[in-house]
Image (tube, coloured by chain):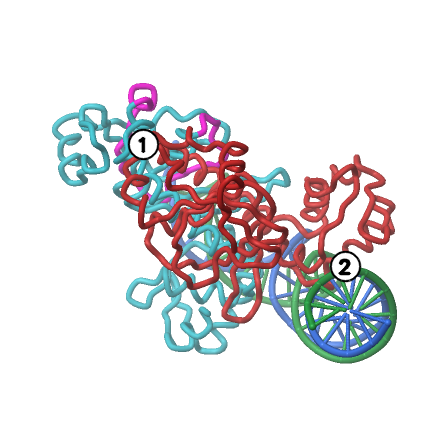
Chain colours: A cyan, B red, C green, D blue
DNA sequence: CGGAAAATATGAGATATCTCATATTATTGT
DNA sequence: ACAATAATATGAGATATCTCATATTTTCCG
């Protein structure tokens, strides 16, 4: 992790203005940092020093279970807070956040700002909205995971992740995200291929029957 | 649903004081209401008129999927907010809340208090903490549901739900809560019985090997 | 560039979980 | 008290999903 100094710090502050999330001047406190791909923004069990606001890049939020299995709870993309739950609860980080690509964040030092943040109605309202959306999203994933077989969930995931009908994600991450074995994920990809819904290419899959895929997605 | 008038209203307001959750005097706005067992506090698709604060009794939060299946997301017990997400997002209720027992709530009328609530740092901080705990809880359930087979999840549920080592819950609700078929739930109960971990009685099960049950719970 | 590590691919048996059907018991409401 | 409804119980076949093992290809880094 690297903190950016002027004039780069100022460049990002102007590119991603977050003053409106607060009722007091937050800018003097903000540090701009960048993480290389594969770095940990938070490690499981660590104590958070910053509340981060991700503005560029992609990271993954995951938890490692006692049995060694990994659940990838969500991919994080801009704009998103990171570490906000631990700010509120003064707990150690229970889930890891690791960068998938190079990531740029605005970092708010907790020791310097915590009292201000926890009494700022503007910030707290934004945070409530953020947390309520987070709870809503994870609730939906939880119930859908229980009720729909992989073929439906994968169809939905392909639709959401494809760019110009081209899907290109790492199976290793996707099986952790959908909570299934690698083998089974491959099985279902093979099945969708057989049925002509998608077509395998060297670096991913091309959607061939978007209508059918949408039907499968629900 | 029935609103309680004085002096009953006052009785509950004094028994369950929530003034400290706000920085302005909320009491004049609060109505105290009771729901009979089986009543809907919120129906899926309805518009919320009140932010509720459950103080007595038990309710269940669930969602009905397009395929007709029901996922019971959580059992709600005091103290808990209900309808807070829709207060923040001005959306229709996506999940139903139905009482399991007779329920008593403090009801805050949204149209009269919304502006005050959304600018009250004290309330918003409490709400943030509540929402962050909610997100944390559902995240844990989500990942454990993916990673652990029913026997482990059921063991944990029995431990949490038993009173004086006696477990007495409706299988119909528990299978919706754990996201498994009724039959499979019965299978696993039979297996735990066979192994002498629990023992079936006329109205429930008695825990016979708490140590073993705790091992199974994780 | 080359070796190590990571990702992808495949086959096959095992098992957790599902659906379906039916019977019995308990609860509820009139 | 009785009928209807809800909950509980059971057997059995089907299937979604898992684990394991191995081979091949791709990516990464020194």
- Residue picked out by circle 1: B121
Residue B186 falls inside the magenta stretch? no
Residue at x 32%, y 54% (from the top left corner): B90
Q: Is residue B38 left or right of residue B161?
A: left
Q: What secondary structure is marked by label 1?
A: helix
Q: Secondary structure at mark 2?
A: helix
Q: Position of residue A13 (x, y in %)?
A: 17, 34
Which of the two residues, A26 or B5, is positioned nearer the viewer here?
Answer: B5
Q: Identify which residue, C11 or A32, lies in the foreground.
A: A32
Lateral position of residue A197 relative to residue C24, left or right: left
**What chain does badge 1 belong to?**
B
Q: Which residue is mark 2?
A: B186
Picture residue at 18% right of the left edge, 24% below the top: A28
The residue under the point 67% across, 47% down is B153
Farthest residue, direction top: A112
Disc 2: which chain?
B
| Residue range of the region highlighted in magenta in the rendering | A89-115
State the image quarter where residue B130 is shown. top left
Left or right of B175 in this view: B34: left
Query: Does residue B170 lie above or below B53 as drawn?
Result: below
Q: Which mark is residue A116?
A: none
- The alpha-carbon separation of the residues under discs 2 and 1 comes to 48 Å
Which badge, 2 or 1, is on the more N-terminal residue?
Answer: 1
Between A111 and A88, the one nearer to me in the picture = A88
- Residue A20 placed where, x, y %? 19, 38
């Amino acid at each position: 992790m690297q903190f950016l100094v002027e004039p780069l710090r100022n460049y990002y502050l102007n590119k991603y203005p977050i003053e409106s999330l607060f009722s007091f001047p937050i800018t003097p406190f903000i540090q701009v940092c960048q993480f290389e791909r594969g770095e940990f923004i938070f490690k499981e069990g660590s104590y958070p020093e910053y509340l981060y606001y991700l503005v560029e890049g992609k990271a993954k939020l995951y938890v490692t279970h006692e049995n060694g299995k990994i659940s990838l709870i969500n991919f994080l993309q801009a704009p998103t807070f990171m570490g906000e739950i631990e700010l509120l609860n003064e707990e150690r980080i229970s889930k890891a956040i690791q960068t998938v690509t190079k990531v740029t964040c605005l970092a708010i030092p907790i020791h310097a700002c915590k009292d201000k943040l926890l009494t700022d109605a503007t910030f707290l309202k934004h945070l409530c909205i953020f947390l309520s959306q987070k709870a809503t999203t994870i609730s939906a994933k939880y119930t859908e995971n229980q009720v729909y077989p992989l073929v439906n969930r994968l169809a939905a995931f392909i639709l959401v992740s494809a760019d110009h009908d081209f899907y290109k994600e790492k199976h290793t991450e996707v099986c952790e995200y959908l909570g299934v074995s690698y083998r089974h994920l491959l099985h279902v990809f093979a099945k969708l291929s057989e049925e002509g819904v998608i077509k395998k290419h060297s670096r991913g899959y091309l959607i061939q029957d978007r209508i059918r895929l949408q039907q499968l997605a629900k």
